[in-house]
Image (cartoon, grey):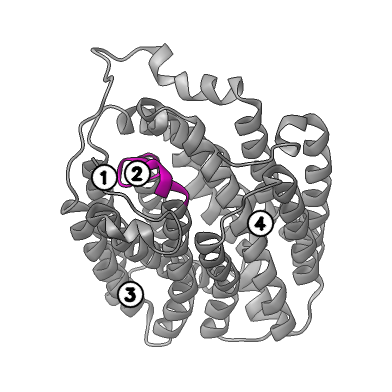
Amino acid sequence: MFPLASPGGFAAFRYRDFTAFYIGRTFNALAVQMVDVAIGWLVYSLTGSAFALGLVGLCIFLPNFLLALPAGQVADMFPRKKIMALCTFLSTSAAVALFIAAATETVSVPFLYVLIVVFGVARAFSGAAGGAIIPSLVPNDTLSNAIALSSSAYQTATIAGPAIGGLLYAFGPDVVFGVTALCFGVSFVSYFVMTPRPITNRPDKLTYEYMTAGLRFIFSKPIILGAITLDLFAVLLGGATALLPIYAADIFLVDPFGLGLLRSSPAVGAFIMSILLAHYPLQRQAGLRLFQVVALFGLATIGFGLSTNFYVALGFLFVLGASDMVSVFIRSTLIQIETPDEMRGRVSAVNMLFIGGSNELGEFESGTLAALVGPVPAVVAGGVGTILVAIACARFFPQLYKRDALG
């Protein structure tokens, strides 16, 4: 049994395993952000191609798309902490390979794409397990607080990661990849020391019905389906972050550290918002707030796309991140509350396919569109599309729009 804890503030940190999970998630996200900004800059410096940047997102999306159902199945059948530890070990190995290639000056674009796929495989399985494990780490009355703090861990790393990665890149890509490997190593140790938790209602054998149960569950819940659909298309259309290397190098004329600041700005907004949500969680009109923040996300994307001043762009990216954090919080809480524990791995995997995968697919879409019409029209069109999606989803998912309390 869990001891009683206040559901606000930093209550979730009273539980040892959640603290270990938080540390592991922070360092894992820090490593991911550093390696992403370094690979993005490296690919663009080697190719000078917006389409090549888009392929980076595609290489991460494909494992999510192809492995979503198996990853969710694995997360509901095997200890989730072991899955997370093994995936982090795989990411550590890939980071070490990047370090060796960069140190020996044998890096090639195809080699980078292959390792990006490896990172994508690790993210697919660890994401499904990590998304499902949180409710088992804290009592129900602390779940919203744990979700907000878990999001703050990711956003903390997303603030520091790109800036640190951009700064370290000045000393060479091998330095960035070496530090990335160390961060993945810390994450591995944090996940490894967590207490194993048994899987309940584990099937005797695998069936097609078991594997697809998460997908069927989501489609049977209009509120969850609406929240996922809304975020899916918003993220798919609003993939401005994929074009940040182009904005940094060609529009704002800044160095890799400037690119790191651009990558960090949305996370600063998201981090501040996650702390506010941890202390002052949403109580009423959750559905309305969800549609409002998605529309605001679209407006901020348009503002960034039209920016010619570096500091103004940072401001729009800050708003973009803050609005996205509210959307993530509402969607994540709804899914965790309404999904039984024995299905959380499969539902989490499908959620990652729709949302996490669409993030990378959105980067591919933005890169491809930018190659055709230019970066500014591509970003602005994405922002306009996001607003239109919010309006359309409000009509097609009235249950979500009218949802009041999260619980």
Q: Position of residue 47 (x, y in %)?
A: 56, 68
Helix, strand or loop at mark 1: loop
Separation of marks 3 and 1 at Cα, in angstroms: 52 Å
Residue 357 visible at all: no
Q: Which residues are magenta?
A: 130-144
| Figure check: 56 above or below 71 | below
**Residue 393 quadrant:** top right
Q: Relative to residue 19, is residue 335 drawn left or right?
A: right
* Mark 2 crowdedness (10 Å alpha carbons): few <14, some 14-19, many ≥20: some
Mark 1 or 2 closer to N-term?
1
Is residue 211 located in the magenta-colored stretch of the structure? Answer: no
| Figure check: 370 above or below 350 | below
Q: Position of residue 366 (x, y in %)?
A: 69, 55
For the point 74% across and 63% down, which residue is it?
A: 301
Mark 3 or 4 closer to N-term?
3
**Residue 372 quadrant:** bottom right
Separation of marks 4 and 2 at Cα, in angstroms: 36 Å
